[in-house]
Each structure stands twice: as structure tokens, then as C-alpha cells.
Amino acid sequence: MKGLDNFTLDLKKCLRELEEFEHLLNTNQTLKETQDILPFFKRRLHLSAFIGVYVPQIIRFN
């Protein structure tokens, strides 16, 4: 099993990545999961981490 890396969320980077996500959605009529969505989020760790903690049902994370 792959281990987890230490990570510190940077909100400024997260906001910039969120703007990039908005741009991706606004400039594409259709998106493919393996060609568009997965590579996008793999390159944007701060946005991915934020989405992981945004879900209200998650009580504890590290």
C-alpha cells in the first residue's frame, strides 16, 4: 500500500487552483475523467486536499 506524504495546505495556492478549476469548467463543454479531471487534480494538491476536508461528514483528518 502506498504511504501518505506530509502536506500543509496553503490557502492562497488553493484559491489559485480553484480559479484554475473554474477556468477548466468554463472553457470545456465536455470533460473526460481519465484525460481531464484526474490529471487536473493530481497536479493541484492544495485544491484536492481542500476538497477532502470540505466534506462535513469528515470529523478527523491528518
Image: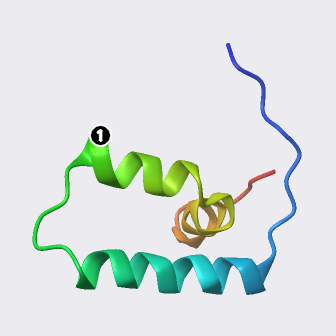
For this orientation, the residue located farthest to the top is 1
Q: Nearer the viewer, residue 31 or 9?
A: 31
Which residue is the site of mark 1? 34
Residue depicted at x 10% and y 73%: 29
Indicate the position of residue 48 as horizontal and vertical percent values: 58, 60
- Which kind of residue does numbered mark 1 sit on? Thr
For this orientation, the residue located farthest to the left is 29
| Quadrant the N terminus occupies | top right
Q: How is the image coloured?
A: rainbow
Indicate the position of residue 49 as horizontal and vertical percent values: 65, 61
Q: Nearer the viewer, residue 27 or 50?
A: 27
For the image shown, how many numbered marks are present on the structure? 1
Indicate the position of residue 46 as horizontal and vertical percent values: 68, 66
Q: Provide the secondary structure element on which disc 1 rests.
A: helix
Residue depicted at x 48% and y 79%: 20
Q: Nearer the viewer, residue 23 or 14?
A: 23
Residue depicted at x 20% and y 50%: 32
Left or right? Give the position of 25 relative to 30: right
Indicate the position of residue 8 as horizontal and vertical percent values: 87, 62
**In the figure, 1 relative to 15: above or below?**
above
**In the figure, 10 relative to 35: above or below?**
below
For this orientation, the residue located farthest to the front is 27
**In the figure, 46 relative to 10: above or below?**
above
